[in-house]
Amino acid sequence: MSDARYSPMLEQYFSMKARYPDAILLSRVGDFYEAYGEDATTIAAALQIALTSKEAGGGGRVAMAGVPHHALDKYLAELVAQQRIVALADQLEIPVPNKLVRRDVTRVVTPGTLIEEHLLDRGSNNYLAALTLAGDAIGIAYADISTGRAAATAYSGDGGLEETLSELVRLGPAEIVADLPPAIRDAISAQLPAVRVTAPPLAIVERHEPTVIDGFSLDESLAMRRCLDALGAFVRRVGFTAPAGLLRDPEFYRARTFVALDANTRKHLDLTKSQGANPKATLLATIDRCKTAMGSRLLSRWILAPLVDRAEIAARADRVETLVGDYPSRAALQELLGGAFDLERIAQKVRFRRAAPRDLGSLRRTLALLDPLRAALPPALAAYAARIGDHAELRAELEATLNDDLPATLADGGVIRPDASPDVRECVELRGNARERIAALEERERQRTGIKGLKVKYASAFGYAIEVSKSNLALVPSDYVRKQTLANGERYVIPELKELEIAISSAQSRQLRLEEALYANLVEAVAERVDALLAAADALAELDVACALAQVAGERGYVRPRFVAASTIDVSDGRHPVIEVLAGDAFVPNDLHLAEGAGRFVLLTGPNMGGKSTYLRQTALLVILAQIGAFVPARAMELGVVERIFTRIGAGDDLASGQSTFFVEMAEASNILRRCTRRSLLLIDEVGRGTGTIDGLAIAQSICEYLLGLEAQAPMTLFATHFHELTALAEHRPLVANFHVTAVENTRAGAPVFSHRVLPGSTSRSFGIEVAKMAGLPAGVIARAREIASVLGERPALDEQVPLRARLAAPDGREETQLPLGFP
Ligand code: ADP
Ligand code: MG
């Protein structure tokens, strides 16, 4: 891009831009961050700011737009929200007139590499993910750059890609770095359409001596290592450096240590993000009583990765139980946790040497809480004391070095306590003395000139000056040098005042240099202890989550679920954790019994709006709560560990996806049938609704038969359907138990009253027309629907349905009705 007709400054700009072609380049020029050329046009439109132009050298002009440096954060937030990448170039030296300032890109802001609190959601992790292939393995690694947390896993062989995609969707990364064939990249983009997928900045070079990671094959180990390398390269590329490693030691894990939740399940259950109208109606939001951002993030990770190991589940639930039973300890811990700052993100900023004074101030306040926290631990949680650790030394260093009140930036001065350094103290004293001498000078000049209103003032344009009002100008002595004329007076200087001013400003700049050096030392001292701080952060997060789960359990009457060896689920008076809160006392609890043999397959019928979908979702949420180690909203619950949860929720709920809903439905069903295991929980809601009645019923029945045919290997299934015909399956298939949700007809209003109670047996009443009436369909349409229903109500065999059309002559005598066919 470098072009002879550009001025040196623009040439500098475009040569930096050439190195970051994907980014918008904002370059610091004085008090502004400016963009030129195409980037100027882009940001002017994106940020709704003025587009101007600038002399480009050689008589041409180039487009220009800029934002004031103090408002950069606000504009950055806006650009990031628009999924844009921004490169920030800073001045690397103090500007001197008539010389081009050295500038370079110091930071590239991308969606997956944010560390700034105001650009991040406090309660969720922001992941950068990397994917690559090695031999027959596909590796995936991811890191939250703001917390340093990193992990990797790998899959090989059949279904590896599917598993990888599913894991990727679970993580919901903000950005992906992938070194993959186009077909796989396309598959990723199809799953996560809004997420940027970029090639890694460097070719990922094979290591010479690959080491096998415990529990993984050589290819898998290689793939994971390469992904981690790609993450590291990307993080350096965006401008972060850390002398002792950019991230925490990665955790290598196998997906099977968690309950497999496929993408649909995570979506349909509104676990951490809501698909519905109410963004707060998620499982996470309902139970997140965490006091710290670290706790909220941990809880969010737990919800998306419930455990399968009974001992681990029990260890978590033990902690919750302790705190449910010990209100004073819980209250004391929560009170203290409420004062803690985000230790994890602060530690990571320290690692990158990007911690601002107030970050260290927050660290100081958090460390001050740790001793009382350790003291507040009930005996059963005493092990946390060691994990929190002793940070007295660091805390003392912070307290001795940092001032009580801290400025926003180091450049503002006043970060270091004068007691911490004789040199800083000297500067502070020099400035203090000079100010006192200025005050004395003011008093002396008043006496000497006899001007009572004489004042020494500081003006940013030229420093200290003596101000005299118009009426007193006659009294001004001859040694005053006039500097500026004001509306009602004049400003003067005298040599002595200038000397004092120089004394102040040189003391000030010396102090700033001293403070910079001392602050850098302090950051190094914290950096040396980053690992210990992160260990404390982890401990705090776990305690916070345990307290939050105990609080929810106490407030809402949750109970501890009991685990058994068999693959069963038994719930008495279970409630839907989210709807229960919205509905209050109106929520109707229900039992559930899924056995190993008879009754493993619950076929649920009942009218629209009866509560079938709610019952299905509630079951999955109870299992998830139980397996993250939480208490559950029920009178009692007993279950065997569930390894996979699959959901197929009715067509029509997926309209946004753009694919044919029936196709999506069948693709989901096929995924379920191929991947379910004996220890899976299947929620199948209204399968077959997306196509014609005959095909729909045929497919629904055949899916049931397939699952029932698995016999001893059959998963636990809740099958909600409007195809009443399916209830006949129970006659020949011992696994099937028919249940229904009830409603009674309110004869006077003609509207059904739903009891939302799930009871044994089946029902054929759909109340579809009554619901349509409640929804306000015109009376004429309702009346006609009743007429059609009464004809169809003779319940012919399925293959007789088509000829039935002929009998549905419209009332005005036309041959055929335009009303769609379909069972009421
Ligand atoms: P269906 O799937 O049978 O059409 P839904 O599960 O969608 O019914 O529930 C319909 C409405 O009834 C929803 O607004 C839901 O909040 C409410 N509902 C469902 N189950 C219960 C319950 N057990 N207690 C109270 N309200 C419920
Ligand atoms: Mg439903």
Image: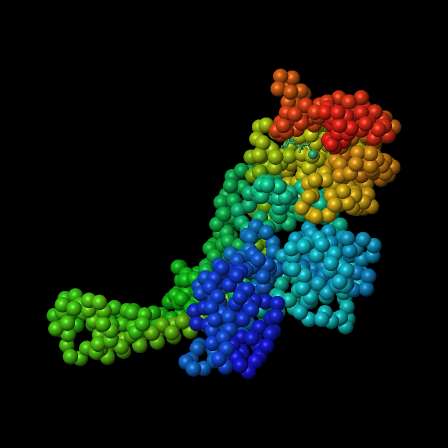
Viewer-side residue, 765 vs 50: 50
The image quadrant of residue 797 is top right
| Residue drawn at the location 42% of the way across and 80% of the way down | 96
The image quadrant of residue 83 is bottom right
| Residue drawn at the location 76% of the way across and 31% of the way down | 821
* In the image, residue 326 above or below residue 467: above
| Residue drawn at the location 17% of the way across and 79% of the way down | 479
* In the image, residue 366 above or below residue 259: below
Viewer-side residue, 551 vs 650: 650
Viewer-side residue, 422 vs 667: 667
> In the figure, is residue 130 to the left or right of 32?
right
Q: Quadrant of ligand 2?
A: top right
| Residue drawn at the location 62% of the way across and 46% of the way down | 273
> In the figure, is residue 723 to the left or right of 125?
right
Residue furthest front in the image: 813
Instruction: Say which quadrant the N terminus sits in.
Output: bottom right
> In the figure, is residue 18 to the left or right of 260?
left
* In the image, residue 142 above or below residue 5: above
Residue 516's spot in the image, x, y percent?
A: 45, 71
